[in-house]
Amino acid sequence: MKKLLVAGATMGVFSCPLSSFAQSSVTLYGVIDEGFNYTSNVGGHSNEQLQSGYAQGSRWGLKGSEDLGGGLKAIFQLENGFDVNSGSLNQGGRMFGRQAYVGLSSAKLGTVTLGRQYDSVVDYLAPLTANGNWAGYLMSHPLDNDNTDNSFRLNNTVKYASNNYGGFTFGGLYGFSNQAGGFANNRAYSLGAQYAAGPLTVAAAYMQINNPGGTTGGSLATNDTNFFASRERVWGGGVNYTIGSAATLGLVYSHTDLTNATGSTYVGNFANTASSLKFDNFEANFKYQFSKDLFAGAMYTYTMGHFNSSAGDSKPKWNQFGMMVDYNLSLRTDVYVQGMYQHVSAVSASAAPLNGAFIPGTDAPSSTQNQFVGRVGLRHVF
């Protein structure tokens, strides 16, 4: 990462004493993730393509701080997501779609930030999953239904993150609807906590969004949501345990509950509005660090769905197996190989869009109940 000293705003350069310059800094950073994907079945055909941002989203950003004295700092972060192959913006075409916030950080009281930010599920629970830690997009839970791969961010948010108290951290977020006469329409709130001590890490989180995607200017915009529903709730917990210095085992459970779901950004409109759409995700993951430059990881997820509509009930079930091997060519550049297989079963016509296997990151569902993706990637960080 390249650090640039910032003197302050242009008008203040000549009035600020030189001794104050070292108290403020800005860091420019980024990730470029590019690779070749082979997908076994996309609407009945295999697909070979270059794809960007799978092990880690391609991005560049600026973050900085200013020492205000007495243990208090002003902080900010602006983070842009982009597609390497086309040069286009991700996250609905936003300039800083990944993160955009400003706030205050206290050495005694914690940190408060305002802007476009991650929810507590992403902050506290996701790092215990494979996809939210070392594996990335392909190994998300079906449709990334619990947002552990941060498919969406929340707008108009006020967020608190505690300091570390003997390994215990916690925080919460509130996202405003920004709508006159509609205070609860497309608002969001979440809470989370994590405890890390020695080889053990434990975490839990909760999130609720009222009318996600229902308005453009609310906490979860129409072009940013995973699901369209009158209410979305996600909660879960997990544990990671490191064995020796090389092996890490993780177990995670999450539950997603959608009321009056009409569709999602992945599969479009459902054949029949789901008065209740639920997902229960059970994940086991394992990572082994062979050396400082080489690791291998594997994960298995079993997901139970429950789609209830006027046309009847459907209880689809997903089995997912994923593997990854990563080798560092240098401190900033690595190459990796990934494989992901999904099988979906016990589906019915009432949940037609959920019938085919659909691994997150593929262009469309499989025409069968099975789908496989293989990827070879190159990643560079700066």
Image (cartoon, rainbow, N blue to C red):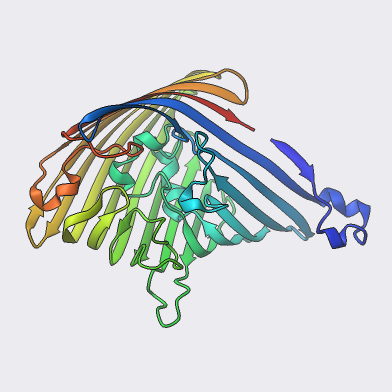
- How many numbered marks appear? 0
Q: Residue furthest bottom?
A: 181
Residue visible at 53% across and 58% down?
116
Say above or below: 233 vs 85.
Answer: below
Question: Viewed as shown, does residue 189 lie left or right of 322?
Answer: right
Query: Vertically, is 105 above or below 240?
Result: below
Residue at the image position 39 percent from the left and 46 percent from the top: 148
The quarter in which the N terminus is drawn is: top right
Relative image position of residue 290 (x, y in whole percent): 48, 16
Instruction: Out of 304 and 192, give the one closest to the viewer.
Output: 304
Instruction: Tell me the residue at 47%/70% (across/down).
Output: 176
The image quarter in which residue 206 lies: bottom left
Does 51 sit above or below residue 20?
above
Depicted 217 relative to depicted 207: above or below: below
Can residue 353 be seen here? The reply is: yes
Image quarter for residue 238?
top left
